[in-house]
Amino acid sequence: KFINGLRVTDKDTMELAEMVLGKVNKSLVQLVESLGVRSIGISGKDGALLKVAKKYSDGQDIGYVGEVTEVNEQIIYDLLEKDFLPIICPVGMDENYHTYNINADDVATAIARADKASKLVFLTDIEGVLEDPNNSETLISKIDTESAKELFESGIITGGMIPKLKNCLEAVQNDVKRVHILDGRLEHSLLIEIFTKKGVGTMIKR
C-alpha cells in the first residue's frame, strides 16, 4: 500500500524488508567486488550511521518508515580513506533503537547533504522526468527550482516521482551542486550524462 508515493511498512513487513535489503546489499557488494572495486556493505544501523524519526506522509501514519534526522558521516569518511566503497542499506534506528525502513532516495539525499557532495545521481527505471509518463520523447533535460515548482503545480509530477524530485530540490538547496535522475537500465548512462552536452537524463540545479 502506498500513500503519496511512499510505501506503508507495518512491523512484520519491516522484518522482511530488512532481511531482503540485507540480501540485496550483499549481492551489490559481490557485484562491485567482481568489478575490481573494494566495497563494504553496511546498514544505517551500523555505528548509528543513520538516526531517524518516525515519518508521516501529509499527516498520515505510514508505519515503520523513518525520516533521517542525523548522519554520522565519519563512518563514510573512514571507509573511503581506507579505499573502501560503502554500500549502504536504507535502514536506521530512532532514539529508542527501533528499526525503520527509509526511502532510499531520502538516504542518498541525507548523505549527499552531510558530505556536501558536488554531485548526486539517482539511477531509476525511467529515462528521467517526463512531461508525459507514457512518452519517453517528452524528457525534460534540465530543471531548476522555479521550473520544478511549475511542474508540481501543473500536476505533471505524479506518483513515485513526487518524493524523488522533492529530494532533488532539497539537495540542491542544501550545498549539493547538481542532481541527476538517470535511467539505470541504459548502459553507461552516468558517463553519457556527465561527459556529453545534452546528456540522457534530467539534471536539477538551483
Image (spheres, rainbow, N blue to C red):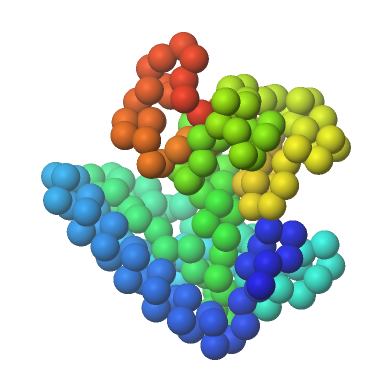
Q: Compare residues 202 and 105 and report the one nearer the observer.
A: 202
Q: Position of residue 181 (x, y in %)?
A: 53, 36
Q: Which quarter of the figure is the N terminus placed in?
A: bottom right
* Image side of residue 172 versus residue 83, left or right: right
> Residue at 57% of width from left, 43% of height from top?
113
Q: Residue furthest top?
A: 197
Q: Position of residue 27 (x, y in %)?
A: 26, 62
Q: Quadrant of residue 134?
A: top right
Q: Quadrant of residue 5?
A: bottom right
> Residue at 33% of width from left, 53% of height from top?
86
Is residue 4 at all visible to an observer of this figure? Answer: yes
Q: Position of residue 110 (x, y in %)?
A: 57, 50
Q: Compare residues 165 and 43 and report the one nearer the observer.
A: 165
> Residue at 81% of width from left, 71% of height from top?
60
Q: Residue furthest bottom?
A: 12
Q: Compare residues 22 and 99 and report the one nearer the observer.
A: 22
Q: Quadrant of residue 41?
A: bottom left
* Image side of residue 151 versus residue 111, left or right: right
Is residue 47 at all visible to an observer of this figure? Answer: no
**How many numbered marks have been drawn onto this rendered protein structure?**
0
> Residue at 46% of width from left, 11% of height from top?
197
In the image, is residue 182 above or below residue 64? above
* Image side of residue 186 versus residue 96, left or right: left
In the image, is residue 93 above or below residue 170? below
Q: Which quarter of the figure is the C terminus placed in?
A: top right
Q: Position of residue 133 (x, y in %)?
A: 64, 40
